[in-house]
Amino acid sequence: MENQPRKELVVSAIENGTVLDHIPAKSVFHVMKILDLDNIENQVLIGTNLDSKKFGKKGIIKVRDKFFKNKEVNKIAIIAPSATLIEIKKYKVTYKKQVKTPTEISGSVKCVNPNCITNHENIISKFTVIKNPDGEIKLECRYCEKMTGKKNMEFI
Amino acid sequence: MKNRSLVSINDFSKEEWIKILDLANEFEKNPTQKILEDYVVATLFFEPSTRTRLSFESAASRLGAKIVGFSDSASTSVKKGESLNDTILTVSNYSDIIVMRHPREGSARFASEVAPVPIINAGDGANQHPTQTLLDLYSIRKTQGTLNNLHIAFVGDLKYGRTVHSLVAALCEFNTTFHLVSPVELKLPSYVKKHIKDKNLTYHQYTNLKDVISEVDILYMTRIQKERFSDPIDYEKVKNIYILENSMLDNSKDNLKILHPLPRVNEINEDVDTNPKAYYFQQALNGVFVRQALLTSILGVK
Ligand SMILES: [Zn+2]
């Protein structure tokens, strides 16, 4: 442990579980919310406004003894497309990759348009993922064609 | 276009729009042709829209098709809670093509995914109404002889009017110069202006109708609804600026034509109706020919 660089020690290491690194500092609590991390029993370590060469200020979330499912990773990719997903088993990194933003998502987000047919009939919502030049993500409803932005994104 | 649904104007290419307009022109010359006698057209109006329904049914009738359907969901199984999925699948058993209007946005796209027969969207909430756009293009081309390089003014509620949004987007394919006349509260939204900017076309914005009349080839009028204003005083301030009167047309171009998607309330004074530049009633009739062209193209008869 003594040889680890200081930045690694800001939020302490975990034996088993998942680390979400390179989260934009302003999105840390949003990511917590969509993953429902305030309602789980696992230990959660959070760091925010940490210095990062790449991002200026970044956030990091470590969840002990938890590995996220595809559906959850997709949510992270929408809220924090720059995030790196790191899985750790027995203090060893077993997986490390930037989350991949899907081109289409279905069934996990509610269309923001209250008059959209998907909010009135038993229809699975489907969106095309649109990435702005600034990296922000918006979802275009396949049915009503309205955009759902990050701010009013409601996961289901 | 055979067997393809028309939900949004972009489901067909520019070349296909032109084919529809050319075919509509043939139907204008010879509107009664019994070429759809073996076909059943369903018209499902989940909300009433007498004007649009009659136009489709007139188009189908002149071609000899049989028509089934309903004009208002109040008297049908939909009222009893039947899902859109079930209604569409059931009606598909009885018809070769479905024309539908529905108050919810996205309903027509969903129907086109579940139906084994093609769907023509006759309006899904505030979203799309592609046959209106095609009949507008037809009316513009017919009166000007071309769709290219025209000066077109849109007047009134440019913020909420879906008719305006999809026509503006379509006209961006024809090097149009746009003249946008509206109260500040009802300006064209930026996501529609983006189409104009993407094509590097010119647009001018005005708040006074008088400033634009002598500049343009087409004056496309729309209704301003009082309920769009958060403050009724703002409405009172602007409502009369956007009323077109015959005397205002004195210095307009000879080729000017006035369009309106109808119904109008008071934004075009009745003294304009007898001016040869008034085209809105003919525009509505053109809808029948355009719908004949669509029905026959999608059914693969023309
Ligand atoms: Zn939607």
Image: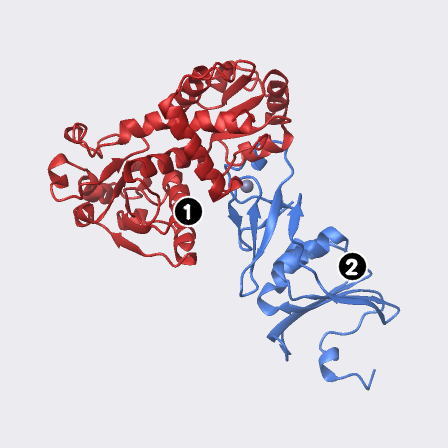
Find disc 1 in the rendering and name its residue: B169
| Residues packed near mark 2 inside 10 Å, few (<14), some (14 to 19) or many (20 plus) | few
Residue at figure coordinates x 81%, y 86% from the top left: A3
Disc 2: which chain? A
Q: How many marks?
A: 2
User: Residue B44 or A2: which is nearer the viewer?
Assistant: B44
Amino acid type at image mark 2: Asn
Residue B89 visible (yes or no): yes
Find disc 2 in the rendering and name its residue: A42
Chain identifier for the blue-coloured part of the image: A
Residue at figure coordinates x 42%, y 33% from the top left: B22
User: Residue A49 or B243: which is nearer the viewer?
Assistant: B243
Q: In the rendered structure, find residue A140 and report the number of the disc placed on it.
A: none
Expressed as whole percent of the image width and height from the top left, the position of residue A145 reads 52, 43
| Label 1 vs label 2, nearer the camera | 1
Residue at figure coordinates x 58%, y 36% from the top left: A118
Amino acid type at image mark 1: Ala
| Residues packed near mark 1 inside 10 Å, few (<14), some (14 to 19) or many (20 plus) | some
